[in-house]
Image (cartoon, helix red, strand yellow):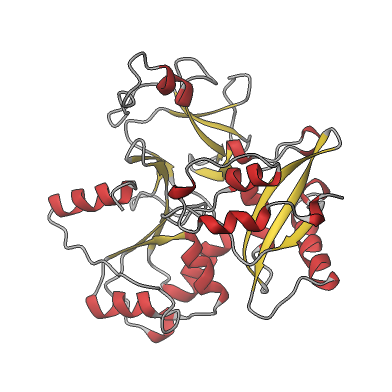
Amino acid sequence: TCGWMMWNWLVSGLASGATLLLYDGSPFYPDGNALFDFASEEKIDIFGTSAKFIDAVSKAAIQPGQTHDLASLRSILSTGSPLMPEGFDYVYQSVKEDVCLSSISGGTDIVSCFALGNPALPVWRGELQCKGLGMKVEVRGDDGALLGPGEKGELTCSNSFPCMPIGFWNDPDDSKYRKAYFEKFPGIWCHGDYVAETEHGGMVIYGRSDAVLNPGGVRIGTAEIYRQAEQIDEVVESLVVGQQWQGDVRIVLFVRLRDGVSLDKGLDERIRGRIRDNTTPRHVPARIVQVSDIPRTKSGKIVELAVAKVVHGEEVKNREALANPEALDLFADLPELQV
């Protein structure tokens, strides 16, 4: 779609003299090897995909490193959502041990990255390798103070940068533009990602800051929960929101399970146990609810804020921007969330 930055990137790839190879269709038909077949047959150098795809082929126990000739493959680029540390493990153990794996974070609004990969730097498990050139990327707390390595906060850019949009259509006084990026920290671009910088200059993305959970005043990134829940074999995909409840916020985890699997007491307890053992008791959901589908954008990103609106009985605008808007109806008036 021309509404996603990857279209622009592909055009610039052509401009640089690269040959582009596009795959149209399900990457899991007839099985999970479809894209690896493509990469092997066409001798692809750079393989662009999503974190969700890497997670899915990992769960399906696909072993392309053993079944395919990937000698030409030099780099794998992952985007769309944070790539979990286990995704890095899978790539290096099951795809190719000497490939450069780059998880990236940016946005269509800047057609660029604030944090990305660099083939001249080491790859660290679960991290984006470095900040983008020309980007004064910093992590800030809610009060605007700069945070040090390991401290979670807002991803900001405190100076202008070459690919910065100059404004919005039909916004003559720039009020909508300023509200979108500069309202939280005047004069400083706030991108809306909840992140931490690492000791060696990399970045870890914990999710969208507007989707951060806040039970009892403790900020929890959604990716911290997804990382644990989706390691359970029966869980195909998950989505977590904060539900306003009795003057506080409680965590609600929605799970889409493998065909033929139901969320019984045993599976519920296993999911909770995995989250509790690998994070903190604060991360454990108050409710876990099985759903048959999870709404996502046309570029494959799950929509936590839209689901939160439905859970709270609010109207969701721009439903037409979703690939499966009918899935939102699955989250309305759920009896499990009334108690």
Q: Give the quarter of the image for residue 214.
A: top right
Residue 139 spot, x, y in % from top left = 54, 30
**Whether residue 84 is visible:** no
Is 50 in front, or is 131?
50
Q: Is residue 210 left or right of residue 333?
A: left
**Residue in the image at 12% along x and 55% along y:** 17
**Residue in the image at 52% along x and 19% along y:** 185
Is 283 in front, or is 289?
289
Rendered position, 160 above or below 151: above
Is 240 in front, or is 15?
240
Rendered position, 11 above or below 264: above
**Residue in the image at 34% along x and 36% along y:** 110
Q: Is residue 162 left or right of residue 142?
A: left
Count of marks, rendered view = 0
Q: Give the quarter of the image for residue 67.
A: bottom left
Q: Is residue 140 left or right of residue 274?
A: left
Residue 209 spot, x, y in % from top left = 59, 36
Residue 150 spot, x, y in % from top left = 62, 38
Residue 333 spot, x, y in % from top left = 74, 51
**Whether residue 176 is visible:** yes
Rendered position, 191 above or below 116: above
Is 219 in front, or is 117?
219
Rendered position, 67 above or below 200: below
**Residue in the image at 66% along x and 74% along y:** 233
Q: Is residue 63 left or right of residue 291?
A: left
